[in-house]
Image (tube, rainbow, N blue to C red):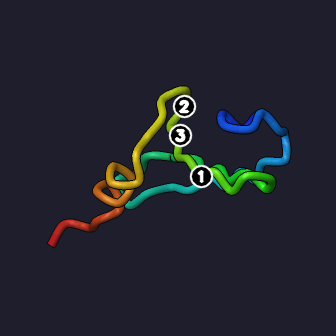
Amino acid sequence: MECPVCSTQDVIEIHHRLPDGSEVSFFTCDRCEEKWWMQGDEGLTLEEVLGRSRRPQ
């Protein structure tokens, strides 16, 4: 994976399975500290990930 901001390949990738069963990936750049979420080829905002992480009451 390449950082979309600084183009380095020094990126950490962490995979998560959310309570709704969907799988997302979190990325953080070791050089510029950019952070982003993806589900497949689709970018997600932090708010979208948090919304999917909430368990029904």
Relative to 15, is 56 above or below?
Answer: below
What residue occupies the far bottom of the structure in this picture? 57
Q: CA distance from mark 2 to mark 3?
A: 6 Å
Position of 13 compared to 21: left or right?
A: right
User: Judging from the image, what secondary structure is the residue with disc 3 in?
Assistant: strand
Position of 26 compared to 56: left or right?
A: right
Residue at label 3?
Answer: 38
Q: CA distance from mark 1 to mark 3?
A: 10 Å
Residue 35: x and y, percent? Answer: 59, 52
Relative to 22, is 39 above or below?
Answer: above
Badge 1 or badge 2: first in the primary sequence: 1
Q: CA distance from mark 1 to mark 2?
A: 16 Å
Q: Nearer the viewer, residue 27 or 52?
A: 27
Q: Nearer the viewer, residue 9 or 14?
A: 9
Residue at label 1?
Answer: 35
Q: Residue at x 74, y 38 (%)?
A: 6
Position of 19 compared to 23: left or right?
A: left
Marker disc for residue 40 = 2
Mark 1 is surrounded, within 10 Å at the Cα level, by few (under 14), some (14 to 19) or many (20 or more) other residues, namely some
